[in-house]
């Protein structure tokens, strides 16, 4: 895969934007095409944009405890639109919730303090594997 | 003397330092020149530093430190640690439990959930999944009645101080509190509360805005006027720099933007014909420090901030009373560890919070104040982290005796030079905003957001390149490092957290059934009429709505209808 198209968005009403801004810039630097969505974008809208933009990956930032609920809604919305991009989460995500997120198809969880260059590399691998129809184990996520 | 000193410095830089550096393999240039009286330049101690409690308050706002309360935690006279979760009743039980454990939290410093902060009821579709999560859900006066139920008798709300982290609907929280006082037969003038109410900062850093800038500022103006005239012991607003820092602003920008915002709020009061020496004294300020663990800048920055604000108030606005010139309020260097707390080897955060507490104690006359070490591990602080925090304050006070002196670095060549330098950086950044036309323009034009985004990215690049070392994050991360574990017991009941939304929604449905619909409709009509007339202060109408048990969503619904909603920037 040459250029990866990523949607970067916030989970629910959470408004801590520093992460999405920094990650968007970093991913662009790493050659990604990035669509950064504004605050309070619903999962349904994210899924619609994923279809319109034919994106490879959706990155969700959550720092306010809404990650599980949002992951569930996002999964439903993506299923409803019939798309299955790579989904990754970042922010403040307690380790105890990793398994539940993985069960909802979240393939990587990036904790605060993650380097964007590492994130870009890992996301690129996940997208390439998805493209090739290979399932990549989430072991080694930056937890 | 200065000629002689200059020569000595030159000799030191050209001979003494390089010779020693070469011998032990130190860098060829010193990291900074040694502090000397030359650093003070044209410094005049009384004019530029002054004594504690005297203009320009560089040393400290008051002649004394606030008394150390034997480390039992803050008294109820001061708003305490930020807390609250679940339904109003869950938070009520939490306040009671903490008191029973001997953990004095101070007056309630209420964390609200995101739907409440955005003016949505708990049963609104927008609120689904977020009710009671990052704070307590507040839908109506009934929730305030529940939340403050433990505060009766000698701790009644005319005796305690309380804070709410609430901005867009700040006027509504104020109305709930006034209505609560009315119902308890207390005079509103006896209340001591602080709504955050700093809406400009929401637009640029914290993201929880509802209405466009102009009507948002009208709401702030109405609350300033109301507090000044009706609630002289309350603070109208808590103007915040640290949130701008957390969003990615540099130290100078975050403080300068907060001062530019503060000037916009001062203008609001002046436009309404209020007396500067009255209404500005009800402003409070928070987080005007460096907000990093940089120790020396951490101490110098609040000193610079206090001096800048004092001079702005006196020289630009002609404030007559010294009290008007105070950068008053808490948390002058609070949150310095916040941006450095890690999920990696989190016990290291105890060291970071200790540094934060030291900076805090040395840069202000307040006591320590540090963030529990498990802040980044998830939401809520463990009982163990709270114990460590309490002991940390006690150790600094009783064993390290850091509270023996106020402004102990006054006159230090290095600290005074840094204070002057930081002052100039902040003033330059402030002047850029003034030149644009002030805070409103800086929000509308996107200047604030661009500046914050740029500095956030620069700081990330320094981390990625390893120029900025973060222990356990971008360096010292290999397998030879050991992670240390501490047992953690949650302060919140997680089962309650899971079921909070369902219970809060059920409570709200009961309320809608039980209240008198006619009174609700009437009060909302009064509110709409008031909102349509810019000259009418909205507070009386909001208080009437509160008494009728109209909900925050219903009140904000009316205001959304009249004011419209803020546009959310895409990308």
Image (cartoon, coloured by chain):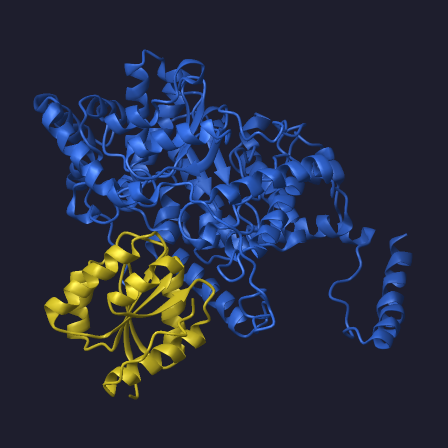
Question: How many numbered discs?
Answer: 0
Question: Please, is residue B556 above or below residue B129 in the view?
Answer: above
* Residue at the image point whose x is 42% and y is 70% from the top: A142
Q: Is residue B332 left or right of residue B119?
A: right
Q: Residue furthest toward the left?
A: B518
Quick one: A48 or B398, which is closer to the camera? B398
Quick one: B38 or B16, which is closer to the camera? B16
What colour has chain B? blue
Find residue B44 and report its horizontal and vertical position in percent: 75, 41
Find residue B407 and report its horizontal and vertical position in percent: 70, 38
Instruction: Judge whether residue B236 can be spotted in this image.
Output: no
Quarter-of-image position of residue B147: top left
* Residue at the image point whose x is 53% and y is 49% from the top: B373
Find residue B318 and report its horizontal and vertical position in percent: 54, 31
Quick one: A12 or B436, which is closer to the camera? A12
**Which quarter shows the C terminus of chain B?**
bottom left
What colour has chain A? yellow
Find residue A126 and report its horizontal and vertical position in percent: 32, 80
Q: Residue furthest toward the top?
A: B185
Question: Please, is residue B570 above or below residue B14 in the view?
Answer: above
Q: Is residue B466 left or right of residue B159?
A: right
Instruction: Judge whether residue B29 can be spotted in this image.
Output: yes
Q: Residue furthest toward the front?
A: B487
Quarter-of-image position of residue B507: top left
* Residue at the image point whose x is 34% and y is 74% from the top: A138
* Residue at the image point whose x is 49% and y is 38% from the top: B285
Quarter-of-image position of residue B95: top left
């Amino acid at each position: 895969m040459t250029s990866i198209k990523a949607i970067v968005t916030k989970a629910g009403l959470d408004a801590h934007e520093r992460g999405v801004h920094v990650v968007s810039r970093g991913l662009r630097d790493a050659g990604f095409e990035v669509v950064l969505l504004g605050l309070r974008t619903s999962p349904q809208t994210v899924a619609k944009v994923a279809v319109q933009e034919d994106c490879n990956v959706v990155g969700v930032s959550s720092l306010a405890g809404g990650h599980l609920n949002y992951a569930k809604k996002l999964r439903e919305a993506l299923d409803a639109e019939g798309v299955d991009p790579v989904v990754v989460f970042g922010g403040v995500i307690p380790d105890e919730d990793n398994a539940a997120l993985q069960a909802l198809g979240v393939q990587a969880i990036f904790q605060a303090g993650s380097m964007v260059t590492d994130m870009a590399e890992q996301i690129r691998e996940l997208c390439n594997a998805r493209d090739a129809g290979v399932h990549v184990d989430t072991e080694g996520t930056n937890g | 003397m200065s000629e002689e000193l200059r020569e000595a410095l030159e000799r030191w830089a050209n001979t003494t330092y390089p010779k020693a550096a070469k011998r032990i393999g130190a860098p060829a240039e010193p990291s900074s020149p040694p502090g000397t009286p030359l650093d003070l330049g044209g410094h005049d101690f009384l004019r530029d530093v002054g004594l504690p409690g005297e203009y320009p308050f560089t040393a400290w706002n008051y002649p004394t430190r606030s008394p150390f309360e034997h480390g039992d935690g803050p008294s109820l006279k001061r708003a305490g640690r930020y807390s609250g979760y679940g339904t109003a009743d869950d938070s009520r039980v939490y306040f009671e439990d903490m008191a029973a454990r001997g953990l004095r939290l101070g007056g309630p410093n209420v964390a609200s959930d995101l739907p409440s902060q955005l003016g949505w009821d708990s049963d609104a579709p927008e609120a689904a999944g977020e009710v009671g999560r990052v704070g307590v859900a507040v839908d109506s006066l009934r929730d305030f009645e529940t939340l403050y139920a433990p505060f009766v008798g000698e701790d009644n709300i005319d005796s305690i101080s309380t804070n709410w982290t609430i901005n867009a609907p700040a006027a509504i929280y104020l109305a709930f509190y006034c209505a609560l006082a009315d119902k308890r037969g207390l005079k509103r003038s006896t209340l001591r509360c602080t709504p955050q109410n700093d809406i400009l900062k929401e637009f640029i850093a914290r993201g929880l805005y509802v209405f466009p800038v102009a009507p948002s500022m009208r709401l702030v103006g109405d609350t300033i006027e109301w507090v000044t005239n009706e609630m002289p012991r309350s603070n109208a607003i808590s103007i915040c720099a640290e949130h701008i820092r957390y969003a990615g602003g540099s130290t100078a920008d975050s403080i300068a933007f907060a001062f530019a915002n503060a000037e916009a709020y001062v203008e609001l009061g002046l436009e309404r014909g209020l007396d500067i020496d009255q209404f500005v004294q009800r402003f409070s300020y928070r987080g005007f420090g460096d907000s990093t663990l940089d120790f020396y800048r951490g101490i110098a920055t609040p000193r610079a901030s206090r001096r800048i604000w004092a001079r702005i108030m006196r020289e630009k606005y002609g404030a007559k009373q010294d009290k008007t010139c105070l950068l008053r309020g808490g948390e002058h260097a609070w949150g310095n560890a916040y941006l450095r707390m890690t999920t990696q080897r989190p016990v290291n955060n105890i060291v970071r919070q200790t540094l934060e507490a030291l900076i805090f104690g040395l840069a202000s006359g307040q006591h320590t104040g540090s963030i529990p070490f498990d802040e980044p591990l998830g939401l809520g602080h463990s009982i163990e982290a709270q114990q460590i925090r309490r002991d940390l304050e006690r150790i600094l006070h009783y064993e390290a005796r850091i509270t023996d002196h106020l402004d102990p670095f006054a006159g230090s060549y290095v600290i005074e030079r840094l204070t002057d330098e930081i002052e100039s950086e902040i003033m330059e950044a402030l002047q850029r905003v003034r030149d644009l036309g002030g805070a409103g323009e800086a929000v509308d034009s996107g200047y604030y957001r661009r500046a914050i985004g740029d500095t956030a990215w620069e700081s990330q690049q320094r981390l990625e390149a390893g120029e900025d070392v973060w222990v356990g994050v971008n360096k010292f991360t290999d397998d030879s490092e050991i992670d240390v574990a501490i047992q953690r017991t949650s302060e919140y009941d997680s089962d309650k957290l899971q079921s909070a939304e369902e219970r809060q929604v059920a409570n709200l449905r009961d309320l809608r059934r039980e209240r008198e619909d006619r009174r609700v409709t009437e009060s909302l009509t009064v509110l709409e009429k008031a909102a349509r007339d810019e000259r009418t202060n909205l507070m009386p109408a909001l208080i009437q709505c509160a008494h009728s048990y109209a909900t925050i969503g219903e009140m904000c619904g009316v205001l959304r209808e009249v004011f419209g909603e803020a546009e959310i920037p895409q990308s």
